[in-house]
Image: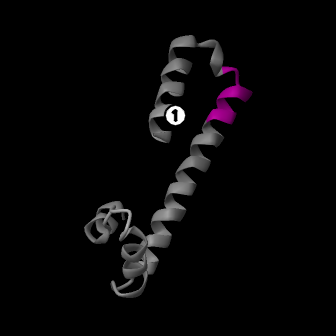
Amino acid sequence: TALFLAMHYTSDIATAFSSVAHICRDVNYGWLIRNMHANGASFLFICIYLHIGRGLYYGSYLYKETWNIGVILLLLTMM
């Protein structure tokens, strides 16, 4: 969905909002693609937080190297 949205989005300060409005109003099923993208990103972070919670519950933080790699991947995902 990100690739499709990127084809129609402009990141200029003056035209960013109008390009989002264009995607929602004028592009065929643009509103659906935008909602799928937003909900998919939210679902991804929910899965990540559940995975971290599971790791805390089962004591996976005791394996320092694996835990540190997971924290680095979380921070990279948030960027």
* Amino acid at the residue labelled 1: Leu
Q: Which residues are magenta?
A: 52-59
Locate residue 46 relative to residue 68 in the image: left or right: right
Q: Residue furthest right?
A: 57
Q: Is residue 56 above or below residue 65?
A: below
Residue labelled with disc 1 = 74
The structure residue drawn at horizontal position 37% and vertical position 78%, both measured from the top left corner, is 23
Display colour scheme: one colour
- The tally of labels here is 1
Q: Quadrant of the C terminus?
A: top left
Q: Quadrant of residue 26?
A: bottom left
Q: Main secondary structure of the magenta part?
A: helix
Q: Is residue 67 above or below residue 21?
A: above
Magenta run includes residue 23: no
The structure residue drawn at horizontal position 38% and vertical position 68%, both measured from the top left corner, is 16
Q: Quadrant of the N terminus?
A: bottom left
Magenta run includes residue 57: yes
Image coordinates of residue 6 in percent, x first then y, are 30, 64
Locate residue 17 relative to residue 59 in the image: left or right: left
Locate residue 69 relative to residue 53 in the image: left or right: left
Say which element carries label 1: helix
